[in-house]
Amino acid sequence: MKSGGGRKAIAEINITPMVDVMLVLLIIMMVSATYIVSKSLKVELPKTSSPADSVPMVAAVVVTKEGSYFFNEEKVDEAALVAKLKAAAAQDPDTSLVVSADKDALHGAVVHVVDLAKVEGLSKFAINVQENQ
């Protein structure tokens, strides 16, 4: 005689919650990485005599709503921006460019910065945005 109405217990593991948690952790890591670029602390690092592995460079450009440019927190005009982008590309061709623009900045100004970077040899870009809360 069988008890329990003949039902067989399900012996599968549901990994959907684990995938959801991992996705949330990945998103948090990606968002926090952009804050590291824009809000870094200025510290004097210790010196070493042994060469270190190459770390990919990150250049940050900010476009204000007035159309002004800032390269790594330094206000520059378009000619200086071109020179700094060229220098960054010459120093490391794998340099990534992170463009942060004011929400009221003209779309064309952001596209212009990306075009300038492409002309100067940079090929990796990211647009910095703020997530809706």
Image (tube, rainbow, N blue to C red):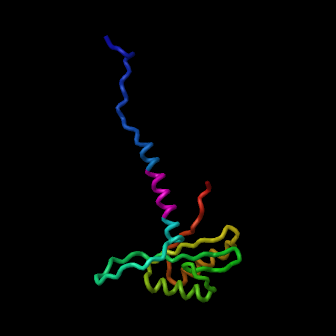
Q: Residue at x 43, y 82 (%)?
A: 92
Q: Is residue 111 left or right of residue 55?
A: right
Q: Residue at x 43, y 47 (%)?
A: 19
Could you tell me which quadrant the C terminus lies in? bottom right
**Residue 53 rendering spot, x and y as whole percentages:** 33, 77
Could you tell me which quadrant the N terminus lies in? top left
Q: Is residue 116 magenta?
A: no
Q: Is residue 18 left or right of residue 48?
A: right
Query: Relative to residue 133, is residue 61 depicted above or below?
Result: below
- Label count reads 0
Quarter location, residue 119: bottom right
Query: Relative to residue 103, is residue 1 depicted above or below?
Result: above
* Residue sticking out furthest to the top: 1
Q: Residue at x 42, y 45 (%)?
A: 18
Magenta segment: 22-32
Q: Main secondary structure of the magenta part?
A: helix
| 6 vs 130, nearest the viewer | 130
Q: Residue at x 42, y 75 (%)?
A: 56
Quarter location, residue 116: bottom right
**Residue 126 rendering spot, x and y as whole percentages:** 53, 69
| 81 vs 40, nearest the viewer | 40
**Residue 105 rendering spot, x and y as whole percentages:** 69, 72
**Residue 103 rendering spot, x and y as whole percentages:** 67, 67
